[in-house]
C-alpha cells in the first residue's frame, strides 16, 4: 500500500523516487554515494562516518538491491562480504566480521547479529526473486546455513555461541553477551526465514517472532514509547555501570541504534498486520515528539523517560525518517506532520550520510509500498 498517496504521491512517482534514492546512494557524487564497485564482480558499502565496511551496511545495501531488482550490485556486495568478512575459523566461525577496512582487512573478529539477520533475509528474498544459482549464489542454501549457525552454534557442540538465546528466543546484542538491542528484533524477518529453514529451525523462528513482539512491549517506555540502544532481557535499559568502557560509553538512552525500533514495528505492522499495541506504541512515540518542549527542539539524545540531554543527535535525518514511518501505522495529524517533514527533507550529505540515508531509504520504501515481501 502506498501510504504517501494521501500526500499526492502516486505509485509511479513513489517508484521513481525510490530509484532516485537508490542511484544517489549507489552512484551519486563523492558527497552522496556510499557504494564502491571493486573489480569486475565485487563492491562494498562504506560507513562514511567511521570509514569502514560493516555487516550492517553490506546487508542493508543488499536489501536495497533486492527491493530495487538490482541483482548485479547485490551479487557484488555478497561476494565482497563472503570473500573478506566471512570467518572460516575461531569461535565465530560461520559468522561475518562486523567491521573491515575498505581493502578487506578485518578490523575485528567479532560479529554483530543485525548484519547476519539482514543477510539471511536478503538471501531468502534474492532466491525467491531471481532464483538460485551455484556456490555462494545458491542464495537459499547460504541463508539456510547461516540461519542454522545463528540459532544452533554452541548448543550443538560446535565452538562459540549462538546469536539467538535458546531459552528466551531473543536475538543477543552479540553472541558473547546475554543482553539485547531492541532494534535488532525483527519478527517480520523471522516469520519469513521459515521458507528455507530446516524444520527445527523454522519452529524456532516462529517462537522467536512471537518473543520479539513481546520484547518490544518490555523495551519501549510505557509513556514515551522510546527504546534504549541496548537492553536487558527484561527490557530494562542496559546500564552503563555494567560495561561502560567496553562498548564505548552509554547505550541506555534513546540514541542512534534505537531509531530503528519504531521503523521495525512499522514494517512488521505492514507485512503482518497492525496490532492494537503497535498503534498505541506509535501514538505514544510520535506524541512524545509533539510535546511543546520537543516540537522545535527534537534533535537531541533523550533518556527513556523523556528527559532531554544537552547533546545533539548524531543522525537527525534518521530521526525524521523513522518518525515518519509511524504514518504506516497511524493516520492522524501528528504522523502526517512528520511524513510531510520527511518528504521535505533531502538525503544527508557529508561524512555522516551513511546511516541517515539507509534509514531514509527504508522509511521511504515502507511508506510508499515498495518495501515488499519477495
Image (cartoon, helix red, strand yellow):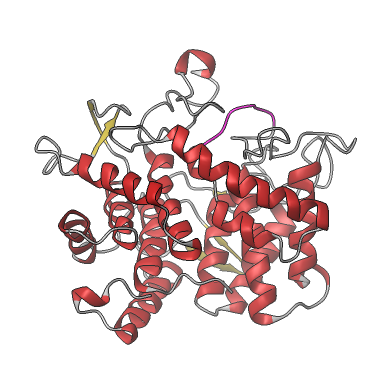
Please indicate, yes or no, whether residue 288 appears anywhere in the rendered image: yes
Seen in the picture, residue 149 relative to 321 is either above or below; the reply is above
At x 57%, y 65%, the residue is 62
Seen in the picture, residue 117 relative to 36 is either above or below; the reply is above
The image position of residue 179, as x and y in percent, is 59, 28
What secondary structure prevails in the magenta region?
A: loop
Please indicate, yes or no, whether residue 229 appears anywhere in the rendered image: no
Q: Quadrant of residue 40?
A: bottom right
**Screen quadrant of the N terminus:** bottom left
Locate residue 120 relative to residue 8 in the image: left or right.
right
At x 19%, y 61%, the residue is 336
| Viewer-proximal residue among 231 and 279 | 279
**Screen quadrant of the C terminus:** bottom right
The image position of residue 180, as x and y in percent, is 56, 33
Q: How many marks?
A: 0
At x 58%, y 53%, the residue is 102
The span shown in magenta is 176-181
The image position of residue 34, as x and y in percent, is 45, 61
Q: Magenta includes 365? A: no
Amino acid at each position: 500500500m502506498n501510504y504517501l498517496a494521501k500526500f499526492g504521491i502516486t505509485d509511479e512517482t513513489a517508484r521513481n523516487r525510490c530509484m532516485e534514492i537508490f542511484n544517489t546512494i549507489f552512484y551519486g557524487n563523492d558527497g552522496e554515494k556510499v557504494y564502491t564497485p571493486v573489480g569486475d564482480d565485487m563492491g562494498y558499502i562504506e560507513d562514511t562516518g567511521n570509514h569502514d565496511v560493516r555487516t550492517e551496511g553490506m546487508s542493508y545495501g543488499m536489501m536495497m538491491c533486492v527491493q530495487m531488482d538490482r541483482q548485479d550490485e547485490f551479487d557484488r556486495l555478497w561476494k565482497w562480504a563472503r570473500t573478506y568478512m566471512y570467518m572460516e575459523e575461531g569461535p565465530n566461525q560461520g559468522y561475518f566480521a562486523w567491521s573491515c577496512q575498505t581493502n578487506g582487512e578485518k578490523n575485528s573478529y567479532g560479529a554483530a547479529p543485525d548484519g547476519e539477520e539482514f543477510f539471511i533475509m536478503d538471501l531468502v528474498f534474492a532466491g525467491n526473486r531471481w532464483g538460485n544459482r551455484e556456490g555462494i549464489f545458491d542464495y537459499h542454501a547460504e541463508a539456510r546455513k547461516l540461519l542454522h549457525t545463528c540459532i544452533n552454534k554452541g548448543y550443538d557442540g560446535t565452538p562459540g555461541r549462538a546469536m539467538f538465546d535458546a531459552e528466551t528466543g531473543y536475538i543477543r546484542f552479540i553472541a558473547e553477551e546475554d543482553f539485547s538491542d531492541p532494534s535488532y528484533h525483527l519478527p517480520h524477518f523471522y516469520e519469513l526465514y521459515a521458507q528455507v529453514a530446516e524444520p527445527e529451525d523454522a519452529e524456532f523462528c516462529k517462537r522467536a517472532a512471537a518473543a520479539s513482539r513481546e520484547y518490544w512491549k518490555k523495551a519501549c517506555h510505557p509513556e514515551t514509547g522510546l527504546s534504549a540502544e541496548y537492553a536487558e532481557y527484561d527490557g530494562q535499559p542496559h546500564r552503563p555501570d555494567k560495561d561502560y568502557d567496553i562498548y564505548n560509553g552509554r547505550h541506555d538512552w534513546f540514541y542512534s541504534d534505537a531509531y530503528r525500533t519504531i521503523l521495525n514495528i512499522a514494517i512488521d505492522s505492514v507485512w503482518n498486520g497492525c496490532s492494537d499495541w503497535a498503534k498505541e506504541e506509535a501514538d505514544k512515540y510520535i506524541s512524545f515528539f509533539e510535546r511543546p518542549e520537543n516540537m522545535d527542539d527534537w534533535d537531541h539524545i533523550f533518556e527513556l523517560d523523556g528527559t532531554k540531554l544537552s547533546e545533539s543527535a548524531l543522525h537527525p535525518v534518521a530521526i525524521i525518517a523513522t518518525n515518519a514511518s509511524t504514518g504506516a501505522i497511524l493516520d492522524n495529524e501528528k504522523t502526517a506532520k512528520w511524513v510531510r517533514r520527511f518528504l521535505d527533507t533531502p538525503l544527508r550529505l557529508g561524512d555522516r550520510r551513511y546511516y541517515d540515508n539507509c534509514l531514509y531509504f527504508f522509511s521511504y520504501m515502507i511508506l510508499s509500498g515498495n518495501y515488499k515481501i519477495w
